[in-house]
Amino acid sequence: MVLPRLHQSLAAALRRRSARRLAIGAQRTKPSVLTPALEARILAKTQQRPPDGSTHWSTRKLARVLKIHHNHVQTAWTRARMQPHRFERYMQSDDPDFEPKATDVIGLYLNPPQHAAVFAADEKTAIQALDRLDPVLPLSPGRAERHGFEYVRHGTLSLFAALNTQTGEVPRDPSAGASPLHADLRVVAEQVELWFGRIERELLTRGVFTSVKDLARQIRRYIRHYNDVAKPIRWKYADPTRRITGSTSARTRH
């Protein structure tokens, strides 16, 4: 009679243990389907600052807080085109007449006077001729191009550039200083800044220059090849509701 009682007691204990495990598993189970309500929760939480003091969320960090799988976070971000790891800079003008002035400048780009050449001119100062002490390790499968930390600075060069707004070309010699401005030449700013950003990304940031002369030579070569495929910049202002004003810009809280 003892054995049946032991079996009954053991069976009851196993049932209780199984019930506890099922209850714990039910509590830990993460949603397996990304519902509209869950997606709304993810997007709303993404627009709040993380509680750990960091500036933005990662998929796994947000998933831990919401107790969901990180793939749901990634899917919701992709659908909403949200990229918390990225940010952009902007400049807000406090000039009440900014828009009329911008209209005049952009109108000059789009519809220049007859027999006039319109250039956007500016200067990029103190471009450093940096030479690496260690050899550059080239791009390879699974590895990015690598540069050593140490470098030699041979000097600096200032680039005066003028961008032809009708063709996109840059008729510029970086060693000759600024171009003379004739009476029929109207000089306006901004478009050439876009070109400065391009040469910074494509040449100056990762370039290796053994001297200031070598830097000037490589800039001339870049300009020559750029002009072979140059295109005018197309101005677009498609959605005025997205413009940044004093009432719509976010304030940073400290």
Image: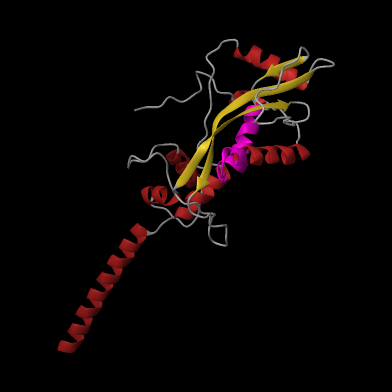
Range shown magenta: 192-214
Q: Tell whether position 211 is magenta.
A: yes
Residue 85 in view: no
Residue in the image at 76% along x and 34% along y: 231
Q: Determine whether 146 is above or below 205 in the image.
A: below
Q: Determine whether 45 is above or below 185 in the image.
A: below
Q: Is residue 168 left or right of residue 251?
A: right
Q: Quadrant of the N terminus?
A: bottom left
Q: Magenta span: helix, strand or loop, mainly?
A: helix
Q: Nearer the viewer, residue 117 or 53?
A: 117
Q: Determine whether 98 is above or below 41 in the image.
A: above
Image coloring type: secondary structure
Q: Please provide percent x and percent y for residue 210.
A: 56, 45
Residue in the image at 46% along x and 26% along y: 250
Q: Determine whether 10 is above or below 243 in the image.
A: below
Q: Please provide percent x and percent y for residue 247.
A: 50, 18
Residue in the image at 18% along x and 88% along y: 3
Q: Tell whether position 68 is magenta.
A: no
Figure quadrant of residue 225: top right
